[in-house]
Image: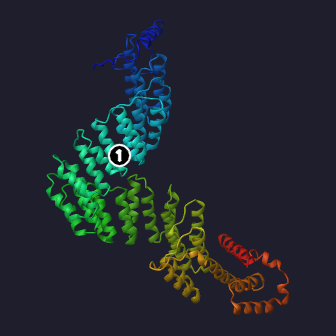
């Protein structure tokens, strides 16, 4: 195989300097690697810089699997004074960005180049894009390319347009577009298509239309980009006008237009285009199935699915998710059996659907088989798949297995925590549910509405009245979550089980007032003071029952009735104190200062003690302000 020599682009002065530096060196270059097998390409026998460059660069491409070998070749280029050769420097930067994946080192190497060019800049920006780090690519463009006045080429601006689209920055996109005009690339079709897409992705469909209508030549990519942009921005009518004006449509044009009608739910128009298509691919069929799935038309979706000449994993996943959404769990499992027996291999999305169906169907054996399938096929579960496994074991009562899955999850979402809290609560382990909530807070995961539904439900099923009141208060005060019907329902059930029917009826009235959307939205915190007094009364009565020798709950009950202006309650509390402790009970005013510390909670859990002390401290502060 002959090697075509690249014409050196370095200056004649650099060439003369290089030739002078080679006079006292051996004409045969040293061996790059110890024990290196003989190369099919003979080493250069001349001191010509072009031959040396090509020989070393061929070694770079063919025999450089790791960064250590790269360093050896790089050192040879530096030793021979060839690294500043634009061909050598560009190939080194590209090697680092594409094959070795060392973007940080490639930027460092870029800084050592005296006269970098657009090829090197493009390689590094493309590397950042390939690593899903578009912001670093944009930063490199400004700090290294624009600041150093590196002249761009016609490959630069499509890359910059793609970067701006990824970060959704129309401001940076406009700046780049201005530089396109400045450098005279506005007539380049490749550049133009990139900016049409950028404006469309950023929601600036009118700017995309202006660029599209600017008078320069267009190709099918231009038309398809405009149609796709209009569709994704909800301009289906405009997309159809462009579609009708196209002289030559390809399958992408048809698919974009069909997906536009699917997005707005116009399945009749989508079906009409689908029937007119001269040729269909698997994307065309999937668009139709997805459209019918969105409107829950199971029969039409299944008919399209059965008619498909060739299905991919997306086709199966759409149908599995449709049956799951329509709660036809049996058909979801049967379709999955056909999928496993066919040519298409399930992916993570397929397994999530069938695990969810198994959990709702309480099919523990099926769930365990899928779990084994995941292990046997070396599938690395993501957060969604792990949570689906977790939900299966929780709903089937296998809390030990659920705990193992939870502990193995590298990343735990709020849904994962909610699932464990709900699972322990529904199986009668309310205290463990609350411990999980505390661990969730320590982990820095903010609870949501579903979290407190699970907590209140756990408190209700376990008969933990005090804890239920407390976490209802935490939801209101700390996390500013407005209660929903589910929260009120859990609290009504909790109070009803404890025989506190008056409080239950009051909550029912509050629920009808605050949840009703047509009435003025009452702020739940307006009832906070009254709520704390109710909670304190429950705590005081409970502690009087279990610790009748301690005066603190008696005094607490008295001051609560005073604060709430319950005159009958005040008289009853005074009589109870007189009967139990005598008149001397009122002489020690320091009792009030210690009201939050006077409870002997015995063998209560640590979180319960902290909770009671927090309640009493807060109430003591409120009472002292009366």
For residue 295, say whether it is visible: yes
Check the picture and name the quadrant holding the C terminus. Answer: bottom right
**Disc 1: which residue:** 198
x and y percentages locating residue 315 in the rendered image: 27, 58
Q: Position of residue 311 (x, y in %)?
A: 24, 55
Q: Taking 77 as reference, is 303 left or right?
A: left
Check the image and report above or below for 347 versus 332. Answer: above
**Closer-to-camera residue (162/352):** 162
Q: Toward the viewer: 32 or 490?
A: 490
State the quadrant of the N terminus: top left
Residue 306 visible in the shown view: no
Measured from the top left, where is residue 624 in percent x and y?
Answer: 75, 77
Q: Residue at x 56, y 69 (%)?
A: 480
Q: Residue at x 56, y 76 (%)?
A: 524
620 w.r.t. 575: above or below: above
Residue 248: horizontal and vertical position, in percent? 16, 46
| Residue placed furthest toward the top | 23
Q: How is the image coloured?
A: rainbow
Residue positioned 39% across, 39% down in the render: 176
Looking at the image, is 151 positioned above or below residue 482?
A: above
Residue 341 lies in quadrant: bottom left
């Amino acid at each position: 195989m002959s090697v075509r020599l690249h014409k050196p682009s370095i200056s004649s002065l650099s060439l003369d300097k290089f030739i002078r530096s080679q006079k006292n060196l051996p004409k045969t270059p040293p061996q790059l690697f110890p024990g290196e097998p003989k190369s099919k390409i003979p080493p250069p026998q001349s001191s010509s810089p072009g031959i040396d460059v090509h020989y070393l660069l061929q070694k770079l491409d063919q025999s450089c699997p790791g960064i250590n070998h790269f360093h050896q070749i790089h050192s040879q280029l530096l030793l021979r004074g060839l690294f500043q050769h634009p061909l050598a420097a560009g190939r080194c930067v590209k090697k680092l960005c594409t094959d070795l994946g060392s973007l940080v080192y490639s930027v460092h190497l870029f800084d050592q180049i005296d006269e970098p060019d657009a090829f090197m800049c493009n390689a590094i920006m493309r590397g950042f894009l390939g690593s899903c780090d578009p912001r670093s690519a944009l930063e490199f463009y400004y700090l290294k390319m624009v600041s150093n006045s590196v002249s761009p080429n016609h490959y630069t601006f499509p890359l910059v347009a793609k970067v701006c689209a990824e970060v959704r920055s129309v401001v940076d996109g406009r700046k780049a577009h201005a530089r396109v005009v400045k450098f005279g690339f506005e007539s380049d079709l490749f550049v133009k298509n990139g900016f049409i897409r950028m404006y469309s992705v950023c929601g600036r469909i009118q700017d995309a239309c202006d660029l599209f209508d600017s008078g320069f030549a267009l190709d099918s990519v231009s038309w398809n980009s405009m149609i796709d942009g209009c569709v994704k921005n909800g301009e289906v009518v405009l997309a159809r006008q462009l579609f009708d004006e196209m002289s030559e449509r390809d399958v992408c044009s048809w698919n974009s237009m069909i997906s536009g009608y699917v997005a707005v739910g116009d399945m009749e128009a989508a079906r009409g285009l689908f029937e007119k298509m001269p040729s269909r691919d698997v994307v065309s069929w999937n668009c139709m199935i997805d459209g019918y799935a969105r409107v829950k038309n199971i029969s039409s979706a299944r008919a399209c699915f059965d008619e498909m000449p060739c299905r991919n994993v997306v086709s199966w996943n759409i149908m599995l998710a449709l049956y799951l959404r329509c709660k036809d769990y049996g058909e979801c499992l049967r379709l999955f059996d056909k999928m496993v027996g066919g040519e298409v291999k399930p992916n993570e999305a397929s397994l999530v659907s069938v695990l969810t169906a198994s959990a709702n169907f309480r099919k523990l054996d099926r769930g365990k088989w899928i779990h084994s399938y995941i292990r046997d096929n070396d599938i690395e579960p993501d957060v969604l798949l792990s949570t689906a496994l977790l939900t299966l074991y929780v709903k089937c009562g296998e809390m030990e297995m659920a705990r193992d899955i939870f502990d193995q999850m590298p990343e735990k979402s709020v849904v994962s925590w909610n699932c464990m809290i709900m699972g322990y609560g529904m199986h009668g382990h309310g205290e463990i549910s609350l411990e999980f909530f505390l661990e969730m807070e320590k982990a820095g995961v903010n609870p949501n509405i579903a979290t407190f539904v699970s907590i209140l439900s756990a408190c209700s099923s376990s008969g933990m009245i005090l804890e239920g009141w407390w976490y209802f208060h935490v939801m209101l005060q700390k996390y500013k979550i407005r209660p929903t019907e589910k929260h009120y329902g859990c609290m009504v059930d909790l109070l009803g089980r404890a025989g506190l029917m008056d409080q239950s009826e009051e909550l029912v009235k509050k629920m009808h007032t605050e949840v009703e959307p047509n009435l003025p939205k009452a702020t739940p915190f307006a009832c906070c003071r009254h709520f704390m007094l109710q909670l304190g009364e429950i705590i005081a009565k409970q502690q009087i029952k279990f610790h009748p020798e301690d005066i603190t709950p008696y005094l607490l009950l008295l001051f609560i009735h005073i604060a709430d202006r319950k005159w009958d309650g005040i008289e009853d509390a005074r009589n109870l104190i007189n009967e139990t402790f005598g008149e001397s009970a009122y002489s020690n005013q320091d009792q009030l200062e210690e009201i939050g510390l006077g409870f002997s909670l015995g063998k209560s859990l640590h979180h319960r003690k902290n909770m009671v002390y927090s309640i009493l401290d807060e109430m003591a502060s409120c009472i002292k302000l009366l």
